[in-house]
Amino acid sequence: MSDSENIISQWFAAHMEHTAEVASSTTADISRAAEAIVQALLLDSKVIACANGNANVLAQYFCTALLNRYEHDRPALPAINLGADGTTYSAICRDNRFNDTFSRQVRAIGKANDILLVVVDDGHKANLIQAIQAAHDREMKVVVLSAKEKTDITSLLHGDDHEVALPNLEPSQAGPLMLVIINALCGLIDRKLFGG
């Protein structure tokens, strides 16, 4: 086996180990988060997602699965990824308000009973923290998908918020597992709302 093949095999072995660990520690949290999202959708509320950097791809994937479809055709579900609007995002940043990139939008479009989904792969982002604070000000519930346990974001959560936290993984390790979790959320949401 070449050095490259050995490195690849080690990466897969580490991924399988992390997958087993996350599967045993997060299933109840994933189920509770899905139920919170379902309850919001049943109240004719929406999901507002936000994330930075590579994690924004996951937030967009989740919103696309709700707005279009996950695995089967069904009615569209209301979801907005705040990081997908590059014009608004850059305008807020241009005015030297990077920390307000998401909170300003949450305050404008968030309503009581909406869900703020925060996907964070490193746990320390001021703009995500301000988004959570804005969501609470708007009487929204928060669901956090985090690559780290016990971060400064965790300390902001209220009793009716939900967190699915991975066991302190690097972003490159967390991303594939977060995608599995998002797929689980999408599958549960569809099953609870539409059966099957």
Image (spheres, rainbow, N blue to C red):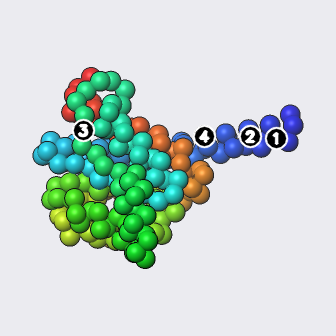
Identify which amino acid the numbered label 2 is placed on: Ile
Q: CA distance from mark 4 to mark 1?
A: 19 Å
Q: Position of residue 38 (x, y in %)?
A: 22, 42
Residue holding disc 1: 4
Q: Position of residue 134 (x, y in %)?
A: 26, 69
- Which marked residue is nearer to the observer: mark 4 or mark 2? 2
The image quadrant of residue 51 is bottom left
Q: Position of residue 175 (x, y in %)?
A: 53, 48
| In the foreground, 141 or 82 | 82
Residue holding disc 3: 77
Contact check, label 1 and label 2, Cβ < 8 Å: yes
Residue holding disc 4: 16
Residue holding disc 2: 8
Query: What residue sits 59% from the left and 50% below the top?
Result: 173
Contact check, label 2 and label 3, Cβ < 8 Å: no
Pointer 2 local density, CA inside 10 Å: few below 14, some 14–19, many at least 20: few
